[in-house]
Amino acid sequence: MTYPSPSPTPGISPQPPTPKVPTLPDGTPDYGRASGQAQSAATGKVSIWDIPTGVDPNKPIWFDIGHSAAHEQTLDLKTGRTNDIASVTSHQIFASPTKIMRQYAALSANDPAAFVAVQKLLASGPWGTVHQTGAFDKYTEAALGSAMAQYLKLSHGAGVAMSFSEYLQKTAATAQALGGDGTSLQGSTPPVINLTDPAEIKAAAQSAFQEALGKGADEKLLDSFVKKFQSAQTNAQLVSGGGTSSMPDLSSEAMAYAQKSDPQGFHDNQRTAFLDQLVNLLGGQRPNQTPVPGV
């Protein structure tokens, strides 16, 4: 026989069921996950990080540029020896704002010195006061969130092709060059950024293009390399606190840039150079052209 459900007592509202507390594998309560569920229910947010409204915490942004190394075997026709030539390929790294927050929070524990360098960048920029304590505190977290919001306006809104890491470094460098606001760095002296003259950079690039491809570069390529090389110089000096020990080498960077700008042209020019070497070894009269090591 089926009995009807009891009617609620007049004047008394029915009570909602008590939510279940998540448990760990051993059966004990998982209070950390329970707290996160309670916060999500109360605020509608799924992130524990201080990410501004309007920034999707789970949508990846262009975070940085990575480098992959490869090795190729080349034959030196003069000596008959095989050389191992290293080649570096750049690629874009994407990460969500949530993952970026997690990465920096972990960095504060795993590599405090590197994390202080990040705090210096944030303290130099216009994203709020940051104390260089080496701790992932609320000031650092808020500044990172503010920086990501402004970066999205610049990259997605204005269409500027720049990674988030590059945005932090360039904005901090500009603020330091202007003297900052006098409060964020708390009395520390901004480092002086030394950059190579653009004319010298262009001359090195032209020389590299002639050597690697057998032809010169146009003005657009030269201007692009000037920006790339000076940006690398700025980043190196910010990381080293204004020092020059880790400064990029102009000749090496120019050669790498020339080869990567036209891989097929570099391959064809190398082939011609090796043929020249072979003809010379056989006693021919072909003009000599020396092969260029790949980078």
Image: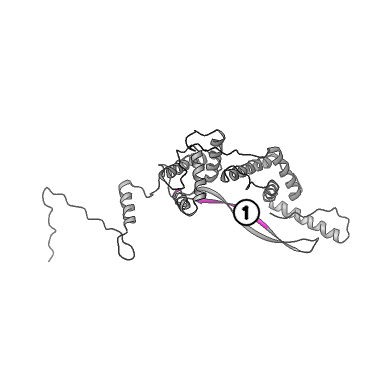
Quadrant in which the C terminus is drawn = bottom right
Instruction: Determine the main secondary structure of the stretch shown in magenta.
Output: strand
Please state the total of marks drawn on the protein image. 1
User: Residue at position x 40%, y 48% from top?
Assistant: 49
Quadrant in which the N terminus is drawn = bottom left
Q: Is residue 116 magenta?
A: no
79 relative to 11 in the view: left or right:
right
Image coordinates for residue 85, horizontal then vertical, percent: 69, 58
User: Residue at position x 71%, y 40% from top?
Assistant: 200
| Colour scheme employed for the rendering of this structure | one colour
Which residues lie in the magenta part? Answer: 86-98
Question: Badge 1 is on which residue?
Answer: 89
User: Residue at position x 71%, y 38% from top?
Assistant: 199
Amino acid marked by disc 1: Thr
Image coordinates for residue 236, horizontal then vertical, percent: 60, 45
* Crowd around label 1: few <14 · some 14–19 · many ≥20 (10 Å): few
User: Residue at position x 64%, y 59% from top?
Assistant: 70
59 relative to 16 in the view: left or right:
right
Q: Residue furthest front?
A: 187
15 relative to 170 in the view: left or right:
left
187 relative to 1 in the view: left or right:
right
Work out whether residue 219 or residue 202 is closer to the camera in this orientation and state it: 202
137 versus 7 height, above or below: above
Image coordinates for residue 132, horizontal then vertical, percent: 47, 43
